[in-house]
C-alpha cells in the first residue's frame, strides 16, 4: 500500500518529533557530561578549568552521598512494597461485585490526581502534625504519646505520603489487568474444588505477573525522581535523613551553585535510572511485537 | 457467564471496599471540609469541627488576596493547555505516519522516543537551568510550556500511536474504492475515528502537565509560577493555618480532580505505554 511518495511524506511527518526529542535529549546530556568534568561554580567568577574525575570523587566520597543512596533505596523500596501489595489487595477487592462500584473506584483513585506539593503539605500539617494533626489528636485522645512524624520517623513519613499518591496507580493498573482475566477459568477451578487461596495463587497471580512487573518498573522510574514532596516537607532533613539522590543533586546545583558537582551527580542519577529503564523497555518492546 | 451473586455478599463487599475508598479519599474530603471553616474552627478537634461549627467562604477570599490565586491558576491553564496543544501539533503527524506507513525503523524509533522519557529530570537540571538563564527564559510561561511539551511528547506520541493502530486499514481501502479523495478520506473517515483517542490523549496530558512539580518549581519564581509553585508558599509556618491551606489546596486540585475522574481508563494506557490495556 505504501508507495515511495508516501514513504518520504511519512519521513517528513515524523521528523519534527524526532528532531525535537533528539535535541532535548542530546544537548543537555552532552552538557551535563561536559560540566561534570569542570571545576565550575556559579558563585566564582573566572575560568572553569578541567577537573578530571575530581567532581565524581568528591560527590561519591561525601557522606551525604552514601546517605542519599540509602534513602533513595529505602524510599523506592518502601513505596513499592506498600503500593504493590496494597494495590493487589485493593484491585481484587474492587473487582468483586458490589453496590456503587463507580463511586467507590473514584474515591480510591482520586489521590493520584492530587499534585505532589498539595498532598505533601496536607499530610504534613493536617495529619502528621503532633499537636493539631489528626493522627496526633487520635493518639492523645487514646492516651498515647503522639508521634512527631517528621522529627522521629521523617523518611517513613515521606514514604506514607508518596504511597498515598501511588497506591491508586497500582490499583488502577492491576484492576484493569484483572478485568481481562477469564471468569470461566476461575469458575471451573472453583468447581474442581480449588479454594480461594489456590485460585489466587495459581490463576490470578500468574495472570497479573506482567501487570505487576509493569507497575514496579514504571513506579521505580518516577520514584527515583521524587523531589517536590521532600522540598515542601523536610528540605532533605533533619540532617540528611530524607535527602534522596534527586534532592542531593538539586542542593549542590541550585542551592550551592556547584555546576560541576551537580552535573557529576546528574550523570550518576542517569546511569542508575538507565539500569531500571533497560528492563522496562524490554517489557514494552515485547508487547509491541505481539 | 456471570454468576448470580447474593445481595448479602454484595453488601459485605461494598462495606469493605467502601471503607477502603473512604480511607483513601479522606484527606481530600477533609480539606474540602476545612476550606469552608474559619481558622479558629479549623484547628479544633476533628469531631468538634465536624459537628459544632459554622460555614464560611472567607478562606478562599483570603487566599486570593494573599497569593493571587487567579494569576497562578491562569499560568497553570496556559502552561498545561499550551504544552498539550504544541505536543499534539508535533505528535499527530509523527504517530500518524508510524501507524499508517510503518517502515522497518518504526519500532526502533518508538522505543527510542520512549527512552527519552526514562531520563531522570535531575540529570539534565543544570544545563537546562543554565540554558534558560542565558536565554532569559527562567520564570517565563513560554519556556515552561516548551519544557513540559518536550517531557510529555513521548507519552503523547505513544498514546496516539496505539489509538491510530486500532483504526482498521480496510476501512480506508473501502473508502478509496468508493472514490474518496485523500482529503475526503482524512476528513470524513479517519478523523471521526481518531477523535476519541485524541481526546483521551489530551485529557491525560493536561493532567500530567498540571501536576508536574519538578520543572515548574525549579524554573519559575513568581511571574510564570503555576499552582504547584503557588502552594509551596503555604508550607510552614503558614501551613499551620489549616483553613487557608485547605482552601488553597482545594483551589489547586479541584479542576484536575474532575478531569481525572473522566480519564481513568486512558490513564492506564498512557502511563504504561500500552503494556497494560
Image (cartoon, rainbow, N blue to C red):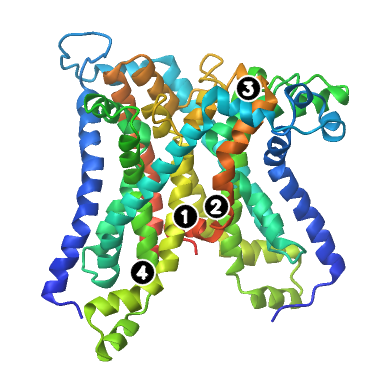
Query: Which of the chains bears the disc numbered 2?
Result: B
Q: Residue at x 18, y 77 (%)?
A: A2
Secondary structure beneath disc 1? helix
Question: Which residue is denoted by mark 4 in the rendering?
Answer: B164
Query: Which of the chains bears the disc numbered 1?
Result: B
Question: Which residue is denoted by mark 2 in the rendering?
Answer: B259
Q: Are marks 2 and 4 on the same chain?
A: yes
Q: Residue at x 51, y 20 (%)?
A: A236
Q: Residue furthest bottom?
A: B178
The answer to whether residue B256 is seen in the rendering is: yes
Question: Which residue is denoted by mark 3 in the rendering?
Answer: B239
- The image quarter containing residue B225 is top left
Residue at mark 1 to residue at mark 3: CA–CA distance: 31 Å
Tag 2–tag 1 contact (CB < 8 Å): yes
Tell me: B170 left or right of B196: left
Residue at mark 1 to residue at mark 4: CA–CA distance: 17 Å
Q: Is residue B244 above or below residue B196?
A: above
Q: Nearer the viewer, residue A14 or A68?
A: A14
Mark sitting earlier along the chain (2/1):
1
Tag 2–tag 4 contact (CB < 8 Å): no
Question: Which residue is denoted by mark 1 in the rendering?
Answer: B203
Amino acid at each position: 500500500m505504501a508507495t515511495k511518495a508516501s514513504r518520504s511524506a511519512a519521513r517528513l511527518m515524523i521528523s519534527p518529533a524526532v528532531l525535537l526529542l533528539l535535541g532535548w535529549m542530546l544537548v543537555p546530556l552532552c552538557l551535563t557530561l561536559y560540566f561534570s568534568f569542570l571545576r565550575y561554580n556559579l558563585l566564582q567568577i573566572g575560568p572553569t578549568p578541567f577537573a578530571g574525575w575530581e567532581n565524581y570523587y568528591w560527590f561519591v566520597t561525601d557522606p551525604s552521598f552514601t546517605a542519599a543512596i540509602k534513602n533513595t533505596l529505602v524510599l523506592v523500596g518502601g513505596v513499592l512494597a506498600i503500593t504493590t501489595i496494597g494495590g493487589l489487595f485493593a484491585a481484587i477487592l474492587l473487582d468483586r461485585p458490589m453496590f456503587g462500584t463507580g463511586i467507590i473506584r473514584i474515591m480510591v483513585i482520586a489521590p493520584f490526581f492530587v499534585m505532589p506539593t498539595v498532598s505533601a503539605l496536607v499530610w504534613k500539617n493536617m495529619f502528621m502534625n503532633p499537636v493539631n494533626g489528626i493522627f496526633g489528636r487520635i493518639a492523645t485522645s487514646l492516651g498515647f504519646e503522639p508521634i512527631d512524624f517528621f522529627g522521629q520517623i521523617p523518611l517513613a513519613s515521606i514514604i506514607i505520603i508518596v504511597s498515598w499518591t501511588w497506591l491508586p496507580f497500582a490499583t488502577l493498573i492491576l484492576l484493569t489487568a484483572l478485568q481481562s482475566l477469564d471468569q470461566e477459568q476461575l469458575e471451573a477451578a472453583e468447581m474442581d474444588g480449588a479454594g480461594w487461596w489456590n485460585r489466587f495463587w495459581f490463576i490470578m497471580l500468574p495472570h497479573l505477573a506482567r501487570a505487576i512487573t509493569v507497575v514496579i518498573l514504571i513506579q521505580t522510574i518516577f520514584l527515583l525522581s521524587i523531589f517536590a514532596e521532600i522540598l515542601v516537607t523536610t528540605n532533605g532533613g533533619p540532617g540528611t535523613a530524607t535527602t534522596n539522590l534527586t534532592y542531593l543533586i538539586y542542593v549542590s546545583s541550585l542551592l550551592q551553585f556547584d555546576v560541576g558537582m551537580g552535573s557529576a551527580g546528574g550523570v550518576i542519577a542517569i546511569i542508575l535510572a538507565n539500569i531500571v529503564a533497560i528492563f522496562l523497555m524490554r517489557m514494552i518492546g515485547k508487547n509491541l511485537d505481539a | 457467564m456471570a454468576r448470580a451473586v447474593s445481595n448479602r455478599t454484595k453488601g459485605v463487599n461494598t462495606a469493605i471496599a467502601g471503607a477502603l475508598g473512604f480511607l483513601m479519599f479522606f484527606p481530600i474530603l477533609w480539606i474540602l471540609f476545612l476550606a469552608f471553616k474559619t481558622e479558629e474552627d479549623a484547628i479544633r478537634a476533628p469531631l468538634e469541627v465536624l459537628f459544632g461549627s459554622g460555614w464560611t467562604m472567607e478562606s478562599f477570599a483570603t487566599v486570593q488576596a494573599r497569593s493571587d490565586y487567579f494569576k497562578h491558576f491562569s499560568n497553570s491553564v496556559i502552561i498545561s493547555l499550551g504544552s498539550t496543544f504544541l505536543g499534539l501539533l508535533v505528535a499527530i503527524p509523527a504517530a500518524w505516519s508510524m501507524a499508517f506507513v510503518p517502515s522497518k525503523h518504526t519500532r526502533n524509533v518508538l522505543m527510542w522516543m520512549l527512552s527519552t522519557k526514562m531520563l531522570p529530570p535531575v540529570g539534565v537540571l543544570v544545563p537546562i537551568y543554565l540554558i534558560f538563564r542565558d536565554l532569559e527564559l527562567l520564570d517565563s510561561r513560554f519556556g515552561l510550556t516548551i519544557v513540559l511539551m518536550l517531557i510529555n511528547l513521548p507519552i503523547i506520541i505513544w498514546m496516539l500511536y496505539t489509538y491510530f493502530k486500532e483504526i482498521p486499514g480496510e476501512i480506508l481501502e473501502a473508502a478509496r474504492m468508493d472514490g474518496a479523495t485523500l482529503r475526503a478520506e482524512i476528513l470524513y473517515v479517519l478523523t471521526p475515528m481518531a477523535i476519541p483517542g485524541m481526546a483521551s490523549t489530551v485529557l491525560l496530558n493536561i493532567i500530567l502537565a498540571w501536576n508536574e512539580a519538578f520543572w515548574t518549581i525549579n524554573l519559575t519564581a513568581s511571574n510564570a509560577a503555576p499552582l504547584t509553585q503557588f502552594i509551596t508558599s503555604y508550607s510552614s509556618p503558614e501551613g499551620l493555618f489549616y483553613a487557608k491551606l485547605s482552601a488553597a489546596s482545594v483551589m489547586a486540585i479541584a479542576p484536575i480532580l474532575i478531569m481525572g475522574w473522566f480519564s481513568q481508563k486512558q490513564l492506564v494506557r498512557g502511563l504504561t505505554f500500552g503494556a497494560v490495556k
